[in-house]
C-alpha cells in the first residue's frame, strides 16, 4: 500500500527506462481485454489472477521485472506474488500509461 501511495504522489525515483535498457521484463497484469486495448510495446501480459499458475513463463528468478496494470493495485499484488515465489528483483511500475511515459 505504501508503494501505491508513493507512486500516486510521484515519490518513486526508480529509473524504469534504465531498467528496461538493461533487459527488464515489463509484466502487464491487466485482463487480456484491457491489454488488447493498449499496452507498452514488448510487454508480456499475464493477468494477475492467472500469475500464480503461469510463473513458468517468466524464465529467470534473477531477471528484473517491472509489473504494471491500470492503477498500480494489481501490479502491487503481482509484485508480492513474484517475491513470495523467489523472484528477486521486482518493481511495481504502477499504471501502464504513466509507466510508458517514464520509458
Image: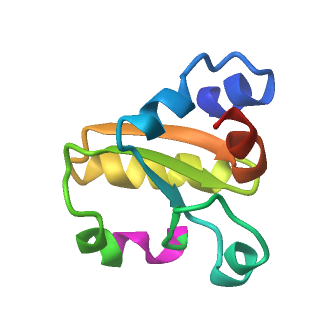
Question: Which portion, as a residue range, is magenta?
Answer: 48-52
Can you name the residue that lies furthest to the front here?
A: 21
Quadrant hosting residue 33: bottom right
| Frontmost residue, 13 versus 6 | 13
Q: How many marks?
A: 0
Q: Which residue sits at x=20%, y=43%?
A: 62
Image location of residue 51, percent across then percent down? 41, 70
Can you name the residue that lies furthest to the bottom here?
A: 33
Quadrant hosting residue 6: top right
Q: Is residue 22 left or right of residue 74?
A: left
Q: In this view, does 82 lie to the left or right of 41?
A: left
Image location of residue 60, percent across then percent down? 19, 55
Q: Which residue sits at x=63%, y=82%?
A: 32
Main secondary structure along the magenta-highlighted residues: helix
Question: Is the C terminus in the top left, top right, bottom left or bottom right quadrant?
Answer: top right
Q: In this view, does 15 lie above or below 85?
A: above
Question: Is the N terminus in the top left, top right, bottom left or bottom right quadrant?
Answer: top right
Image location of residue 28, percent across then percent down? 57, 61
Q: Is residue 89 left or right of residue 44?
A: left
Image location of residue 9, percent across then percent down? 80, 21
Name the image colouring. Answer: rainbow
Q: Is 11 included in the stretch rendered in magenta?
A: no
Q: Which residue sits at x=61%, y=56%?
A: 74
Q: Which residue sits at x=60%, y=16%?
A: 13
Amino acid at each position: 500500500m505504501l508503494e501505491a501511495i508513493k507512486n500516486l504522489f510521484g515519490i518513486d525515483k526508480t529509473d524504469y527506462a534504465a531498467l528496461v535498457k538493461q533487459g527488464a521484463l515489463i509484466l502487464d497484469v491487466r485482463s487480456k481485454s484491457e491489454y488488447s486495448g493498449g499496452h507498452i510495446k514488448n510487454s508480456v501480459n499475464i493477468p494477475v489472477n492467472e500469475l500464480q499458475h503461469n510463473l513458468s513463463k517468466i524464465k529467470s528468478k534473477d531477471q528484473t521485472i517491472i509489473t504494471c496494470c491500470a492503477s498500480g493495485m494489481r501490479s502491487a499484488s503481482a509484485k508480492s506474488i513474484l517475491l513470495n515465489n523467489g523472484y528477486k528483483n521486482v518493481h511495481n511500475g504502477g499504471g501502464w500509461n504513466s509507466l510508458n511515459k517514464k520509458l
